[in-house]
Amino acid sequence: MATARSGAASPKGGSNAVDEAALERMLKQQEAQLPRDQEIERILSTFRLDPFEILQVPVVCTPAEIKLAYRKKSLLIHPDKAQHPRAQEAFEALKKAEAILTDDKQKEYFTKLMWDAEKDLKAKWRSEIKKGRRPESDLADEDSEKFRQEVKQHYQEFVVEVELRKRQQRQRAMEMEGEEERKRQEAAEELKRKREREKEWEDSREERVSNWREFMKSGGLGKKKKKTTTKKKVTGTKTTHANPENSYIKRVGGS
């Protein structure tokens, strides 16, 4: 009987061992997913027009640093490995940041934006210090974490303002192009109508000539009738004096 009880207990213990092993594997997977999820959340919360912060590389970075940062992060958050529901979105943002910083013109543009934002922030702080609204110590250490965080924040505002101006300029340019296109279309339509009128006039030339000939054969405008006038007969004797202005007609019986 003891042997039977021992044999029955063995499968139960084995089942517990399997469950514990599965749980251990699950916990390890979750631990492995944790840094992936954290990195995905970090990228998604980062300003999309700050490729330096997305890749976590300095503004003055080398192509090798960009490549290494991208490789590490892409392996960490790749949608095939990460279980985060927005892993693909974060991966696309990472790829875009890498594409910007590996393109010389785009990298130069965003680097200039970063330096311009820092320069603009310093100018504002100096103005506030001069007015007594900010302590001088804020500009004493430009490498401090506080200052770098302020620069990043100001960079976002600065870039948004720059991009807004660019969009407004593009919008005005598009509106001007649209107006020019409208004028070109109107001019083209007017030219088309003019040519159609000229063609209609030319096409009707033979008909006009034929009608004129027929008209002339039928007598044209006709002969002009002579205007006849009836002169009233005046009886009397015309007397002429030396002065022609004093000539008059002397009526019979008159003086």
Image: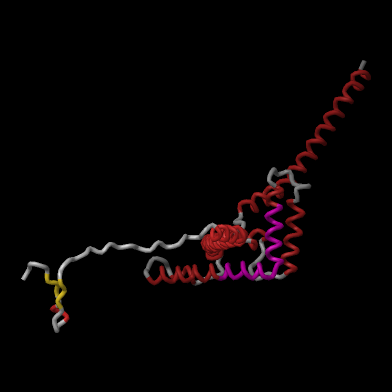
Say which of 78 and 158 sits in front.
Answer: 158
Q: Residue 219, position in %: x, y?
A: 51, 59
The residue lying furthest to the top in this view is 1
What coloring was used for the rendering? secondary structure
Magenta-colored segment: predominant secondary structure? helix
In which quadrant of the rendered image does the C terminus lie? bottom left
Instruction: Give the image location of residue 80, x and y in percent.
Output: 78, 47
Residue 163 is inside the magenta segment: no
Image: 55 above or below 244? above
Q: Is residue 163 visible?
A: no
Quarter-wise, where is residue 216 in the image? bottom right
Please state the horizontal and vertical placement of residue 217, each as a whole percent of the image. 56, 59
Name which residue lies at 81% across and 36% down: 22
13 shown above or below 212: above
Q: Is residue 225 placed above or below 8 in the rendered structure?
A: below
Q: Is residue 68 left or right of residue 149?
A: right
Residue closest to the eye, 100 or 25: 100
Q: Tell which of 40 and 137 is nearer to you.
A: 40
Quarter of the image with the N terminus is top right
Q: Residue 113 vs residue 28: left or right?
A: left
Query: Residue 21 placed where, x, y %?
Result: 82, 36
Q: Name the residue at 14% across, 74% down.
A: 248
Q: Is residue 127 visible?
A: yes
Residue found at the far bottom of this picture: 242
Tell me, yes or no, whether the highlighted magenta stretch contains residue 111: yes
- Name the residue: 12% across, 68% down: 251
Which image quarter: residue 166? bottom right
**Count of labels in the image:** 0
Which residues make up the magenta segment? 91-115
